[in-house]
Image: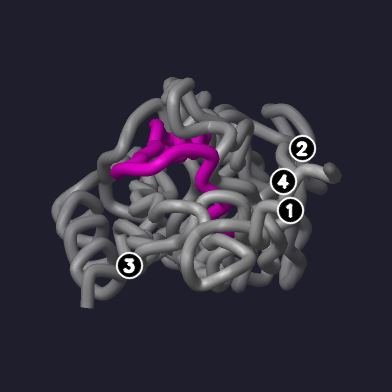
């Protein structure tokens, strides 16, 4: 739906622009880069200029792309250039969004006879976002000196662009020794989390003292820091014998 709206808005910008010569046809009329991660550059995409007439057309100028769009080659070359009858050439551009937003630009091809042909560029800057499920892991009462049952959290990038996971760590020093990453499908950072992709982090709880222990796992990414909360209760250490003593005391030898 959002993709369709982007195309419609772009076409409205082109509507009513300078009249085009019937002989020169740009395809597509609006080049859509779709979604691109902020501050990353897309692969080049091309607009094809086709001379549908029976005479060569001389192009004297092409509007220079600016801002988030940049010329990236193509077979037309730099203006001025000529497109033979029933022939075509391409003009390629890249898209480097500077923020989360929609970006439109209209470029004009001017012919030697004064006719002008417009074509558009459109794209949307986006950022990955981690959806952590569950947002917190709670480990039930676990005796000191033992290891609790492993638990996992799912990290899902719910946006249409990839994101970089730079670091996974903790600033919660008191609980750092009690919680240990024990596996999961997420590789060690840095790594790229694809669009609409997920991986898991698994942890175990090995309390070193009685009482509640907590820790925050800070997942630092290219689009911000996301937090997973860990907590658990350390229970008294289990004795070897039910009465709490290792065995009966021996009488001294007389």
Under circle 1, the secondary element is loop
**Would you say 89 lies left or right of 193 here?**
right
| Distance of label 3 from label 1 (alpha carbons) | 54 Å
Q: Is residue 251 visible?
A: yes
Q: Is residue 106 visible?
A: no
Image height of 231 relative to 167, above or below: below
Residue ID for mark 4 = 191
Badge 3 is on which residue?
Answer: 134
Q: Earlier in the sequence, mark 2 or mark 4?
A: 2
Identify the residue shown where x is 25% and y is 62%.
6
Q: Is residue 247 above or below residue 37?
A: below
Relative horizontal placement of residue 188, taking residue 45 as reference (left or right): right
Q: Quadrant of residue 159?
A: bottom left
Q: Residues within 10 Å of mark 1 (few under 14, many from 20)?
A: few
Residue range in magenta is 203-225
**Marks 4 and 3, how far apart at CA:** 22 Å
Where is residue 12? Give x, y as percent. Answer: 16, 58
Q: Residues within 10 Å of mark 2 (few under 14, many from 20)?
A: some
- Looking at the image, residue 243 sits to the left or right of residue 251; the answer is left
Q: Nearer the viewer, residue 140 or 131?
A: 140
Q: Check if mark 2's residue and mark 1's residue have beta carbons within 8 Å.
A: no
Looking at marks 4 and 3 on the same chain, the residue that comes earlier in the sequence is marked by 3
User: What mark, if any, has residue 73 been given in the picture?
Assistant: 2
Q: CA distance from mark 4 to mark 1?
A: 62 Å
Magenta stretch contains residue 224: yes
Task: Tell which circle, 4 or 1, labels the residue nearer the N-terminal end.
Answer: 4
**Magenta highlight: main SS:** strand
Q: Which mark is residue 250?
A: 1
Q: Label 3 crowding class (10 Å Cα cut-off): few <14, some 14-19, many 20+?
A: few
Residue at x 44% of width, y 56% of height: 35
Q: Circle 4 sits in a helix, a strand or a loop, which is it?
A: strand
């Amino acid at each position: 739906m959002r993709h369709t709206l982007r195309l419609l808005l772009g076409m409205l910008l082109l509507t009513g622009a300078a009249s085009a010569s019937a002989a020169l046809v740009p395809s597509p009329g609006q080049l859509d880069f779709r979604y691109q991660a902020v501050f990353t550059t897309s692969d080049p995409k091309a607009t094809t200029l086709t001379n549908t007439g029976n005479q060569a057309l001389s192009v004297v100028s092409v509007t220079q792309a600016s801002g988030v769009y940049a010329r990236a080659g193509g077979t037309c070359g730099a203006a001025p250039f000529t497109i033979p009858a029933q022939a075509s050439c391409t003009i390629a551009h890249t898209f480097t969004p500077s923020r989360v937003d929609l970006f439109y630009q209209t470029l004009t091809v001017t012919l030697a006879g004064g006719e002008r042909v417009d074509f558009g560029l459109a794209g949307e800057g986006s950022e990955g976002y981690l959806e952590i499920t569950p947002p917190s892991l709670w480990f039930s009462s676990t005796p000191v000196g033992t290891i609790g049952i492993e638990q996992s959290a799912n990290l899902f990038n719910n946006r249409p662009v990839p994101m970089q996971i730079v670091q996974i760590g903790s600033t919660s020093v008191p609980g750092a020794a009690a919680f240990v990453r024990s596996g999961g499908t997420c590789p060690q950072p840095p790594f790229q989390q694809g669009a609409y992709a997920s991986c898991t982090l698994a942890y175990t709880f090995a309390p070193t003292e009685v009482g509640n222990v907590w820790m925050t796992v800070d997942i630092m990414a290219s689009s911000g820091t996301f937090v997973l909360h860990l907590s658990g209760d350390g229970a008294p250490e289990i004795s070897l014998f039910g009465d709490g003593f290792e065995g009966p005391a021996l009488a001294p030898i007389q």
